[in-house]
Image (cartoon, rainbow, N blue to C red):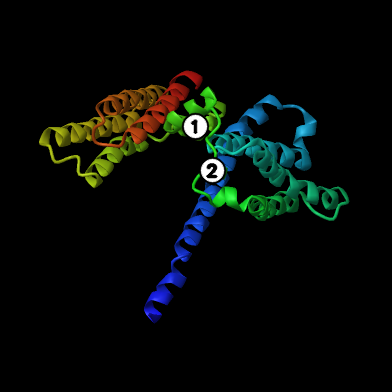
Amino acid sequence: MNEIATTMQAAPAAPGRRGARRFLRHFLEMTAAMVAGMLLLGPVWRAATAGLAVFDRPDVDALVMAANMTAGMTVWMRHRGHGWAPVAEMGAAMFAPFLLLAGPYWAGLLPAEGLMMGGHLLMAPAMVAAMLLRREEYTAASHAGAARPARHPLIGALTRRWPAWLALLMTVDNWLAPSVPPPWVLLVLPAGYLVIGAWRKRLGDRRVLAVQLGGLALYLGLAVVAATVDPGLARYVIGGAWLSHAVWDLAHLRAGAVVPRGYAEWCAVVDAVIGVTVVVLL
């Protein structure tokens, strides 16, 4: 009887743990969306406001950063089915820390570094506070038990093609400040397929393994050529190699072979961006 009573008392703990995990998952997802918005929109803001002195102010820069983070989180929260009220509350949590510290900064009591660092440090507890206002929504299996709102086509595209969007996000700086990767970085391209394919146990077929090893030999040869020829010619060798690997990625994406489809899609976009920026923009 004591064992039964103990079991009955311990039983409710499981839903509580699941709720805590959902709460943490929501927090981490929104943090990732916040960072994505900051990284993706930051370069756009810098390019659009180049030469405007007002945007060189640390306080204005902090508010622009908060707006970028809010944009990323808004897209993700709407995808997750949150209504506009919690979206607005979470947006307020992005701006509140910087607005709170703006007064001491304007009064000369806080340096610019303190404004940025303090705002980021206070942002996490502000997000948690906003989530605690709607604890049931952030711990429930589905938001408020209601059906999700109709998904906007743009959000649907972001969701379906997330590897491509992630790749574009990671290569924004390549468009703004293109550079030529070192020749030996070319070996990372076929090596990634070999490592992932081996880990997934997709290289058991001798023909598949021969193709991957042939790719490694090809890119080793291209790296040697790029490292020994004139830098002007080396740029085209390296750029062409990255572009050719984008085709390699697309072939594996269509076949669903060796690597996960998401990785092949991500890699194809990264390779294409690097190849185009090296060959064309430079």
In three-dimensional space, the C-alpha distance between marks 1 and 2, rounded to whole angstroms, equals 39 Å
The earlier-in-sequence mark between 1 and 2 is: 2
Q: Residue furthest left?
A: 206
Relative image position of residue 227 (x, y in whole percent): 34, 33
Which of the 4 quarters of the picture holds residue 193?
Answer: top left
Locate the N terminus and report the quarter of the image it occupies. bottom left
Q: Which residue is mark 2?
A: 145
Residue drawn 53% across and 30% down?
172
Considering depth in this image, is 157 or 173 the residue closer to the camera? 157
Which of the 4 quarters of the picture holds residue 247?
Answer: top left
> With 47 as the anchor, is 25 left or right in this view?
left
Q: Which residue is mark 1?
A: 171
Q: Residue furthest right?
A: 107
**In front: mark 1 or mark 2?**
2
Residue drawn 77% across and 38% down?
60
Q: Secondary structure at mark 2?
A: helix
Residue drawn 31% across and 25% down?
250
Classify 228 as above or below 122: above
Q: Residue furthest bottom?
A: 2
Considering depth in this image, is 276 or 164 the residue closer to the camera? 164
Q: Secondary structure at mark 1?
A: loop
Residue drawn 34% across and 37% down?
184
Relative image position of residue 116 (x, y in whole percent): 71, 49
Q: How many marks?
A: 2
Q: Residue furthest top?
A: 280
Can residue 161 be seen at all in this image of the molecule?
Answer: no
Label 2, residues with CA under 10 Å away: few <14, some 14-19, many ≥20 = few
Q: Amino acid at mark 1?
A: Thr
Q: Amino acid at mark 2?
A: Gly
Classify 16 as above or below 185: below
